[in-house]
Amino acid sequence: MIRALVLEKSPFISDFLEDTFSLIVCSNYDDAKRKIGRFEPDIVVIDENFDKTGLLDFCLELKNLFGLPVFLIANFYSTLDMTLFQNIGVDVIVKPFTKDELLEKLSGKEEKKVPVSFVPAEILESLKPYIQDEIRKEFITLFKKLTEVVESKYA
């Protein structure tokens, strides 16, 4: 069973997760840090309504010090800059969602597809005036290898 550290003001998230996850609910950031060491959660789920003060720094600390996957439950009309959170590796889940959608995302069962939307020859052809032919050929070889790896991993 996945152990989830949950930071929330009201039991909205924990109500969704209580049957599927082993929950550790926290009342503040310090409590969360103490419980991380004691209970070793697999994931951290934070409701943006919990406490916006220091939220970005706390998420960064969770990612850097503990290496934990962090999920931020955000309101549709949130005033937070979600790109800041996404840039540090926080997965943002925007309300509204169903219980099944939330469980799927938190369980890591969501199918991950990475579209391979570049054509190496076209990219490098546009750069032709700026790079030497030998370097361009090396780039083409690298792009082909990269494309193969990405396609095999996410196909």
Image (cartoon, helix red, strand yellow):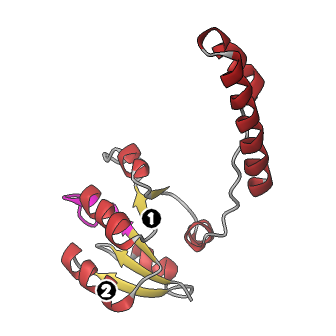
Dot 2, how many residues are within 10 Å of its Cα: few (below 14), some (14-19), or many (20+)?
few
Does any portion of residue 87 appear in the rendered image?
Answer: yes
Task: Tell me the residue at 28%/73% (across/down).
Answer: 9
Q: Does the magenta stretch include residue 19?
A: no
Q: Is the magenta stretch mostly helix, strand or loop?
A: loop
Depth check, front residue: 49 or 105: 105
Does any portion of residue 49 appear in the rendered image?
Answer: no
Q: Position of residue 21 (x, y in %)?
A: 52, 85
Query: Is residue 107 placed above or below 59 in the rendered structure?
Result: below
Q: What residue range appears in magenta?
A: 46-55
Q: In which quarter of the image is residue 103?
A: bottom right
* Secondary structure at numbered mark 2: helix
For the residue marked with disc 1, what is the amino acid? Phe
Residue most extreme to the top:
129
Q: Position of residue 23 (x, y in %)?
A: 43, 86
Residue at the disc numbered 1: 71
Residue at the disc numbered 2: 37
